[in-house]
Structures are given as C-alpha cells and as structure tokens.
Image: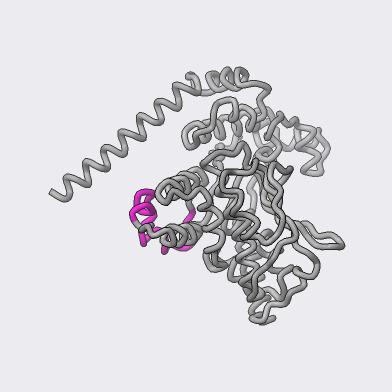
Amino acid sequence: MAMKASRVRLGDLSVGFTQALADAVREQGKRPEPLLEQFGLDTARLSAPRERLSIPRFMRLGHSAIALCDNPAMGLDMGRHSRLSQVGLAGICAAQAPDLREAARTLTRFEPLYAANYRGRSGFSEDARGAWLHFYSISPYNAYNRFVVDSVLAGWQTNLGQVVDRRIIADKVEIEFPAPDYSARYEPLFGCPVEFASGANRLRLSSETLALRNPQHCPGTWRHLLELCERELEQLTRTRSLRERVIQLLGPLLHGHEPDLEEVARSLHLPSWTLRRKLAEEGTQFRTILNDTRRDLATAYIRDTELAFGEIAYLLGFASAEAFQRAFKRWLGQTPGDYRRAQRRAAGEAQSSVASSSTSGMS
C-alpha cells in the first residue's frame, strides 16, 4: 500500500534567533516589537517551547529589519548579539562543554534541535592544525539571505567566546558571496582576513583556540545535558520509512544537477537494486520521490521567496528554466508565473481580511 506523502519544506529554525535580531534593531534606536508582531511573533509565540519559524519567513523578517534600520550589515550585528540560550537545549549544553572544541562540536551536532534546512547541515571538520566550522551553501545570494550567513558565522564566534569567557579570534573566514557594500565591517568583527566569493561559508579556528577551557564547566551537568540532547535528537530524526531517508538526501544533492538512483543508493550504502526493491515494498519508486520532492520545493520557492525561475530551476537540478517550467505545468496545470501571481493575490486578500477584522474589532 502506498504511503501518504509528506510535504517537503525549505526549513525552519527556533524563534529564539529573533531575540538577537530584536537586540540588533534596538541598538539602532528602533523598536523591534511592531516588526515582530507583523510576522506573528507575539510574546506567547516567543515563549512557546520548541516553537519554530519557517526559513522564508525568517529571511523576510531579516530583510524588513535591514530596511527599518537602513543597515545592510544587520546579520553581523545580529550575530554579535547572539546568546547560547537563544538556541535552546543545544546552546545550554554547549555552554557546559569542557572546552571550545567540544562546544563547537555540540553546536553543529545538535543543530537539528534548533534549525533545519533541506539544503544541508552545518559541520565541524578538524585536522592537525585546527578545524573549520562549516555553514552549508544557500546560494544564490540576494538581499534576503546574505544576512543569514553573516548572522551564523558571527553568531558562532560570539557564542564560542561566551563558552570560554573571552573574545575569540578566527584564523580565517570564507564566504561564498562576493564582497558586499558593507564588506569593511567584517575584518574588525572577526579579527582576521575574510575571503569573499569563496567556495564555502566557514570559519577557521586554530588548535590553540580549540583547546581553550571553559571556566564554568561542570562534568556531571555536561554529561546530563548531552544525554538530553541525544535523546531529543533521536526522537526528532527518527525516520519511519526509506522514502523519508531518500527525501533527506535529495535536498543537498539536487543543487545544480539531477541525482539518480545509483547516487542516492551510494549515499545510503546500499546496492542500487536493493534500494529499488525496498522502495517498491513501500509502494513507491525513486522517480516518484524525486518528482514529488521537486514539486513540493518548487511550490515553496515560488510562494515563499523572491527567486527567479531560472534560479529555482538550478536549485532543483533542472537543465534549464524551460525544462523546469514544463515540469511545473505538468505537476500543477499552470505556469510558475501564474502560480506565483495567484499566491500573491491570495496572500494580499488574506492580509486585507485580517486588517479589516482588526479595524472592526476596535470600532
């Protein structure tokens, strides 16, 4: 029997991240509360445990904050105001790590507890001389998402400094997008060379920096918090089907090309014929999963982002914008342009209805 398909989403993150954004807005002499409420982030929602905000909505919120303060470097300021407690249990656990190395590992290993993106996961890669903290690619870059990379890299530096109670100086910072107009803000913040138009978004830490000790470390509390994080992660990432595991792999693989069954089978450490057979036992096949994933992501990108259709085609592994548009019309019976216009009309009508209801309630 075929399993009911779940909708593939672009991703989400803890509403706790908005606290750092609010502090950055206040530093600019503006009130963040009206902006947060505009995005449905009232006191009740900000106080709810495990509450998440969708990635597209977070990017729109950040863009609105940049416009409100006329500050394109808002992401860097947001990272500077970041606090470990704002990323929830993973942050509290990292704050009890014995040293900076374990704190960095904790923040990346337990990232799913506070943020998820179909494009990939952050990572910690150590070698003999130090380690890289990697943030996955979210290209193509524009005014809506550069601040995300800025806030993550600056936030890592700030958070790790809180663990060892001193400012952390990175050896090097690499950023995928070209140097922005505010590029002069980076090196004073990170205290090191910053390379733009790089092949990755990452921050380099030396072995000496990684070895810095946490003066607040308590071994028993650290172990207890690790157990809690492991339990939460197991519950959150427990998969119910092979189909779900394939979907999780497809997101990062789609970027720029169309993955095939053999590529996914290698990632799962399975022979291709075994993957094909097991999917058939679940009532599906690889091509169906690929098409469903592309369709769900396409509708999310068109509805929730400002990306051009050519950019969306690339992100979903289509050879051309024309090929993407043909596939979209086959899936939904309308062109991507018609779908985007219809979604925006519906969103505008919904906002007008809410505004009308609010006005009626005050009369």
Q: Is residue 128 visible?
A: yes
Number of numbered discs present? 0
Q: Is residue 270 left or right of residue 328?
A: right
Question: In terms of image quadrants, where is residue 188?
Answer: bottom right
| Residue 20: in magenta span | no
Return the x and y of residue 224 as percentages of the image width and height.
64, 76
Quarter placement of the N terminus:
top right
What range is drawn magenta here?
A: 34-52
Return the x and y of residue 253 as percentages of the image width and height.
71, 37
Q: Is residue 235 above or below residue 221?
A: above
- Residue in the picture at 81% in, 39% down: 266
Question: In terms of image quadrants, where is residue 281?
Answer: top right
Q: Is residue 21 above or below residue 195?
A: below
Question: In terms of image quadrants, where is residue 355?
Answer: top left
Camera-nearest residue between 189 and 296: 189
Return the x and y of residue 39 as percentages of the image width and height.
39, 49
Return the x and y of residue 116 as percentages of the image width and height.
59, 50
Camera-nearest residue between 18 and 154: 154
- Residue in the picture at 85% in, 62% down: 129
Q: Is residue 200 left or right of residue 52?
A: right
